[in-house]
Every structure is written in C-alpha cells, then in structure tokens.
Image (cartoon, rainbow, N blue to C red):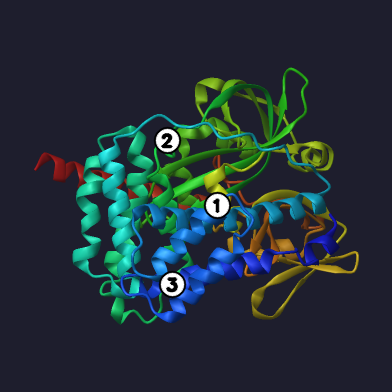
Amino acid sequence: MRADLLAEKIDGLDEALAAVDSFDRVLVTGLLRPRPAQAAALAEFADALDGSPLAARVAEAAGKAASGAAGEEHFTALAAGRTALLGAAHDALISRAQEAAGRTSAEAAAPAVGAGTPANLLVAARSWLSDLARCGWRGIDHEVVSGAARIVSAMLDDPGLRRLAALLDGFAAELAASCPGASLERVPVRRWADLWARAMLLTLPGATGTPETVPATGRLLPLGVDLQEHATAVQAQVHAVFEPADGSPSLLVRASVSAPKPDSVVGAGLWQLLRPHLPLLAAVGEGRATELTGMPLTAAGDLLWSEEHARTGEPADSFATARVALPTATALPTAPLDRHPTAVAVPVFVDGYAAAAEEGGSVAFTFAGQTLDVDVDRIPAAGPLTPEGVIASGACIGLLRWDAGAFRLQPLAVETTVRRKAATVHAGAWAGGTTDKAGTRAEKAATDAAAVLRERAGRLLRK
C-alpha cells in the first residue's frame, strides 16, 4: 500500500466539489425567483463544465435558471452536469486508490440503454422534481411534497419503475418529515441535492433498465463483509476475488443480499434476517470459497446472487486471498449513475503498520512514514471485531473510502493476537451463526423479537 499517494492532492478535485457545492446552495432557496447570488453560483457551476460534452446544455440551462425561466429540460441538464462533476471526482479518487493499492482498473464500456418505460409517469416525476427545484428546500411544504404520493403509487405497478419509485418515496418521506422547510435549523444540502439529481436522471427513458449480465463460472474467494444497516432494511455486501474457470484474469466483485428490518432487531440479530441466503453467509463465516456456475455478473462487478448458481467449496483463508490473489485482481468500472465519491470502496490489504488510538476515539495506522486514518465507526456491532482488536492488529483487510476530504480505511478483518495466540477476526464472522456468548444472546433476543412481531402481524391479518 502506497499511503504517500493517498495523501497527495488530486488535481481538479477541490474545484469540482466546490462547483457542486455552488449548485447545491442554489437549491436551498430555490429557483422560482432567483437572486443575484444564485445567478453567480449557477455561472460558476456552468464554468466548471466548460470544455465537456455537456458544456453548451449546462450553460444554457444555467442561464435559464438564473432568469427564473428554467423548464424541465433545463433542470435535467443541471442534474446531469452535477452528476458528471461528481462522477469525475469519483473516477479520480478510484484511480488514486487503485494506484496506491498497486492494481489496475478495467476500461468502462458504453452503457446499454434500458427498456422503454411509461413516458407519462416519468414526465410526472420530472415535473414534481422540477417543482422542488423551484421552491427550494427552504420553501417546501406538505402540499408540494405530497405531489409525489400519486406518482409513486402508479409506478409501483411497473417492476421497471420500482427503483425510481422507491427513491421518490423515500425522498418525499424525508422532505415531509422536515416540513415546513422555512423552519429547518439545518438543511442536509448535499444529501437532498444527491437524491434530487439522481431521481431527475432516473426519469430519463432507459435509465431504469435492468443491467446486462454475463454468466460467471468459477471460484469466489471472499475477503470480508460490509454490513449496512438502515432503520427499515439491512444489507450484507460480500467483497471477493472471482477466479473464472476459463483461466481469464481474476476480478474484484461484490455479492449483496438484503432484507427488510424492524427497528427492534439490532446487533447480531441482523444476520437472522439474512439467513435465507445462508450458503453465501456461511461460506464467509466459515472461511470457505464458493463455487459459482452461471451466476449473473454485471459489468460493474456485482453478482446478482442466486443460491441455485452457488455451492460451498473448499476452505479459503481470506488473508491468503488478500496476500496472493487481491494484488492481481482487476477492478471493474462503476456503473455510470453510481459514480459518486461516497461510492468509493476499494478492497485493500495493509500490514507492517503501527496502530494507535487518537483523540476522540479514532484510530490510525502508521507505516512508511505515512498515516492512514481508520474508520472504526463503520465496524458493525453484529460481529466480534472491535476498535480494540484493530489497535492490536498487525494486518488488515479493509475498504479504502473517501470521507470528509480524505481517504480512510474501513476494517473488514484483522490479524491479531488473542490470548497470546495468532488469530483472525472478521467483522462478518457471525454471518452464518456463532457460538460466541454475546452473539448468541443477541441472536436469541432477535428470535424473540421476530416471534412477537410475527404473532402480532398474524393477529392483525386475522382481524
């Protein structure tokens, strides 16, 4: 790991993010009656795209928006320009992270256009999003926000529109919980602008199509599990090296499984919700490879997991995989609409460092005269890995992320000493079940909570 490269400034990154911030501030007060400060911010935003294929359209859209005459096509162009800037930032960060890890990335292919979707629903969604841009986050009220409900209801009948429907539904719920916008103490400027721009681009014909896949046959060697928890959902994302059976170069891939989640299920109990996908989780927890036969694989490196295409294979130590197979694995390009700095998650292996706790509970690895911050806040409570275990470690498999203007390492597994014996500790070690006392107690509590919820749901249905 070249930690010195991670500390070097990336040309143009700060300028691109500053231009995005300028546009995001415009959305706070809205574009119904633009002020001079908003016009200046829009001009700065358009200048950042000068020389790009979007330059002319964004410049025109910025001019129309500054005069209060922007239509849906202009808001779409502004959303595209914002997404392009963040995509360029993402690509620069990924390139630097891969360079630091000593790996190469595959060239991105032209994205396939998805199947057609009902134009009237897309137009309705785009109209609602345009209304949001006009009133701004400070101008939202329940009347404006409620306009999404009818659109979402109509979209749910079409499987091809459910991705956009889920985004609009969640976005509208966040906005509704914050109404009226004029009374907000703090506006989540970047987040709401992210959701707005993504939703706006998903209203374009073909943007919500199912990604094309190829059948993947070979051996999957897990590196670790990133457990992502939301109030109503949980997802386990397995990062792994895939070795194709035909002998072609190995690839960095992800396999994700998810489930709805009640608020009462937390900690190790989360794994119970994902147990329908036990073969994948058990392989990770037990340190085994998985043999794939015809598993759908997207161009972005995502395995569309299906148990019928997988079987548990031979033992496979993740640290052996990290030392031997990870350095030569090729990273696949991120899907166009997913290119965003928050999506940076590059699997890396680091060793030979000195770990130390810092002020505020943070942890840092120091090696080769450089310091790399470790994001111990991302370690899930649903596993045996702890900040103390990270500090005591001598080697680490993690995800290199970019947060708050710097690269940080999210630990997935460490090599450490437990009771004077060498041991490996994984954040996802309890994925397939556990005999650990704390994990067993949490699983039992989750079982009891799930039983109560099922019984209550049954009574409601009987009524």
* Left or right of residue 457: residue 88: right
Which residue sits at x=62%, y=53%?
52
Q: Secondary structure at mark 3?
A: helix
Q: Position of residue 459 (x, y in %)?
A: 15, 44
Which residue sits at x=54%, y=41%?
433
Q: Secondary structure at mark 2?
A: loop
The label nearer to you, 1 versus 2, is 1
Please tell me how crowded label 2 is: few (under 14), some (14-19), or many (20+) other residues with Cα within 10 Å: some
Residue 206 image label? 2
Please tell me how crowded label 1 is: few (under 14), some (14-19), or many (20+) other residues with Cα within 10 Å: some
Does the residue at mark 3 contact the one at mark 2 (Cβ under 8 Å)?
A: no
Which residue sits at x=45%, y=70%?
189
Mark 3 sits on what residue?
26
Mark earlier in primary sequence (3, 1):
3
Mark earlier in primary sequence (1, 2):
1
Q: Position of residue 225 (x, y in %)?
A: 61, 46
Does the residue at mark 3 contact the one at mark 1 (Cβ under 8 Å)?
A: no
Q: Secondary structure at mark 1?
A: loop
Q: Nearer the viewer, residue 41 or 89?
A: 41
Q: Nearer the viewer, residue 160 or 353?
A: 160
Q: For the residues marked 3 and 2, what is the alpha-carbon distance in whole angstroms?
A: 28 Å
Q: Is residue 422 visible?
A: no
Mark earlier in primary sequence (3, 2):
3
Q: Amino acid at mark 3?
A: Val
Q: Position of residue 66 (x, y in %)?
A: 41, 70
Q: Nearer the viewer, residue 450 or 57?
A: 57
Q: Is residue 414 above or below residue 334?
A: below
Number of residue marks: 3
Q: For the residues marked 1 and 2, what is the alpha-carbon distance in whole angstroms?
A: 19 Å
Snapshot quadrant of residue 222: top right
Mark 1 sits on what residue?
54
Snapshot quadrant of residue 206: top left
